[in-house]
Image (tube, grey):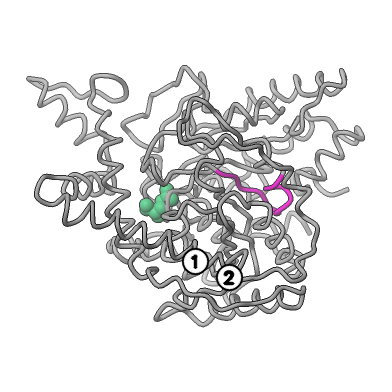
Amino acid sequence: MTELTHLTIADALKGLEKKDFTATELTKAHVDAMAAAKSLNAFVTETPELAMRQAAESDKRRAAGKAGPLDGIPLAIKDLFCTKGVRTTASSHMLENFVPTYESTVSANLFRDGAVMLGKTSLDEFAMGSSNTTSYFGNVINPWKSGNGKDLVPGGSSGGSAAIVAARAAMGATGTDTGGSIRQPAAFCGIAGIKPTYGRCSRWGVIAFASSLDQAGVFARTTRDCAILLKSAAGFDPKDSTSANKPVPDYEAALTGNIKGLKVGIPKEYNVEGMPEEIARIWQQGTEWLKDSGAQIVDVSLPHTKYALATYYIIAPAEASSNLARYDGVRYGLREPGNDLREVYENTRAKGFGDEVKRRIMIGTYVLSAGYYDAYYIKAQKVRRLIAEDFTKAFQQCEVLLTPTAPSAAFAIGENQDDPIKMYLNDVFTVPASMAGVPGMSVPAGLNADGLPLGLQIIGRPWEEETVFRVSDVIEQKAAFTALPQTLRKKAA
Ligand code: GLN
């Protein structure tokens, strides 16, 4: 039998149902795998005892014929989702000792359906980054290694979630994506990840970064597993006024394998200058796979793509600077003493936030300040509208778009670190869909010459995650991506 930690969620659910193994055995296997994956530093907080307790309860529910759709499935939760009674840090010193008294809606939905929580995964501080190197709790290491054996970043900001799913120590995980934080780490770690339509998952209880862009989503090793997880995670929540009151479809049922006649758009502007050959090649390969499967390939244009990054790096910091104003040392989180209130604020915020967060707060307050507001923030909002309209027009010609997920494979820890602009360029293919609020998914499509995974991104019409999943599943079948991170190869053999 396949090792329990190498099963997909779909197969694990069948195995649990057939009593091939119990939730306790499945969870124990993952708790052991977490211990073996300790060197990846993927978790801020591990909760193995809680997991074993939840697994025992799950076994009881199943014995009583009351198992939920995710019953007994061990998951990791990004440490940006508030979890009742379990420390939630956003990977920041500011919230190092913050224990929420409430549960985020997305994690509550997963637990309602029977999921087991293995722990809280590390991220870039307050989800700001693309490399998971800005966490107060240290870098997360990608389980994939480059040919020269160098440690690589897992991507970010949801790097801990992606790394631990790739390392087969969690069957799936939650993530959040503001400008690419689910899709890019999924690509870097050789797994699947979806950022649904803005409003599909509740943001309630998710520590805010940029509220008009933040969207929760899921990671797993297959498209089907993502479909299973999203079905549970998504849904209307009256506690989030931007959450959509729409029924959540059965995403698994959308995986028909049939994309005959489906129109797939290839946006010409994503052929960015200096795109590495290996990225262009995998994109071409993906296009051919879809064509071979009966899809109709159409060339489309998203003319404002070139402004997306610049616009994002005005709007996201602007919203971040407002959202992060609440960390003042008075209400909750870190408090550093001072001689007067102003000094308490200054000392707390100077100590509590890392460099990247401070950089964003400074950019954000600058673009929102009187005199610059019109020139930067309002201008950026106008351009954002144009970017969104590009997608509306493109989707009159096609049902999905196919693009690379990221402009490179995972890079070495420390690389791009001293050059924020270079780091920001990582988001070039993921940011536009975030600006438009449309769904995007990354699916592993192959390996580069150095043996590292590369992902393809499928972008869909608003609320049409089903089509995104269907196309992703077809790519997955064609790519037949079975490679394991080097760190796991010996064990599986
Ligand atoms: N890398 C982007 C940023 O640094 C996106 C992060 C995210 O999606 N949370 O803002």
- Residue 193's spot in the image, x, y percent? 60, 52
Say above or below: 107 vs 128. above
* Residue 185: in magenta span: no
Mark 2 → mark 1, Cα distance in angstroms: 7 Å
Q: Residues within 10 Å of mark 2 (few under 14, many from 20)?
A: some
- Whether pointer 2 and pointer 1 mark residues with C-beta atoms closer than 8 Å, the reply is yes
Q: Which numbered marker is on residue 351?
A: none
Q: Could one spot residue 173 in this view of the protein?
A: yes
Q: Is residue 29 left or right of residue 350?
A: right
* Residue 223: in magenta span: yes
So how many labels did they put on this image? 2
Which span is picked out in magenta? 217-227
- Asked which secondary structure carries label 1, the reply is helix
Q: Which residue is mark 1?
A: 393
Residue kind at label 1, given as amino acid type:
Lys
**Could you tell me which quadrant the C terminus lies in?**
bottom right
> Front-most of 162 and 290?
290
Q: Which residue is mark 2?
A: 397
- Residue 288's spot in the image, x, y percent? 68, 79
Residue name at image x 51 percent, y 35 percent: 243
Residue kind at label 2, given as amino acid type:
Gln
- Residue 159's spot in the image, x, y percent? 50, 49
> Front-most of 100 and 390?
390
Q: Is mark 2 within 8 Å of ligand 1?
A: no
- Residue 258's spot in the image, x, y percent? 79, 64
Q: Could one spot residue 132 in this view of the protein?
A: no
Say above or below: 474 vs 155. below
Say above or below: 418 vs 297. above
